Amino acid sequence: MKTDLQLKHDVQAELEWEPAVTASNLGVEVKDGIVTLSGHLSTLGEKILAEQAVQRVGGVRALVVELDVHLPGEDVHTDADIAQIARSVLRWTAGLNEDAVQVQVERGHVVLKGAVDWAWQGQTAVHAIAQLRGIAGVVNHIEVRHTVAPDKVSKDILEAMRRHADREARHIQVTVDEGTVRLSGKVHSFAERAVARGAAWAAPGVRAVVDDLIVE
């Protein structure tokens, strides 16, 4: 098991390895395997990549994000401009119906609303908007219309997790209630936890995922 000092070194190295992240703008603190990431970044996309870099490191039990997005002057746009660009991006994003997602913008923060058939479509919309320059934040209020039997959703999720991480699937419990999936149990790393969450979101009919997994 890594010490906090070893884990801090590995997290800093992973951030420096990520070419799209300015690691010098970030602070890393570790206590009992819990990583606190602080600092200021210039884009929302860079913030997301920094979070993902930390989650790739083995031994991270939890991540506390204290990052701010400070847009440079040339990236500051009016809410009307952001809304227009966001609508255009969603219209050209594969897998999304042009009229399925509505856009609302306030002070550079984009709120996405609407209804889609699959959870991955909502995640695709969020990812597409988060990569744009001038975006301070994205809130996902997109609902999923598709519904299936809870037993089938649970079975599909467990089978997907076994394909990707056989060892962890045996220690994960899945419950489904009206499209909300709750994951509980123990995994060995943040990366394994991400596999379980990804499998849950990929199942048809999933509207929300509650992650109660414990990283040991």
Image: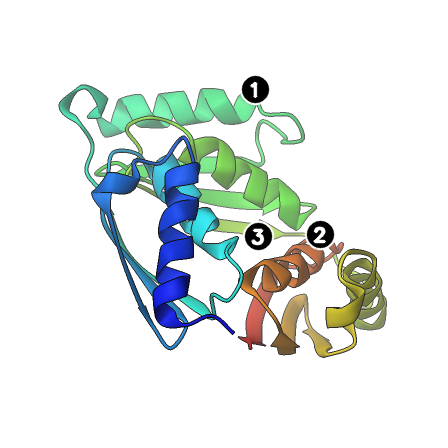
Callout 1 amino acid: Trp
Q: Nearer the viewer, residue 214 or 74?
A: 214
179 left or right, relative to 38: right
Q: Confirm whether residue 138 shows in the render.
A: no
Whole-percent x and y of residue 209?
A: 59, 65
Q: Residues within 10 Å of mark 1 (few under 14, many from 20)?
A: few
Sequence-wise, which precedes: disc 2 or disc 1? 1
Mark 1 lies on residue:
92
Residue 173 horizontal side relative to residue 149, left or right: left
- Taking the image as shown, residue 197 lies to the left or right of residue 53, namely right
Residue 141's spot in the image, x, y percent? Answer: 47, 51
> Do the numbered discs 3 and 1 sit on residues whose CB atoms are within 8 Å?
no
Disc 3 versus disc 2: nearer the observer: 2
Q: Residue at x 67, y 30 (%)?
A: 95
- For label 2, the SS is helix
Q: Quadrant of residue 33?
A: bottom left
Of 58 and 137, the residue lying toward us:
58
Mark 3 lies on residue: 143
Note whether residue 120 is visible. yes
| Callout 3–callout 2 Cβ contact below 8 Å | no
| Observer-nearest of 175 and 55 | 55
User: Residue 38's x, y, as percent?
Assistant: 24, 54
How far apart are the alpha carbons under marks 3 and 2? 15 Å
Residue carrying label 2: 202
Q: Secondary structure at mark 1?
A: loop
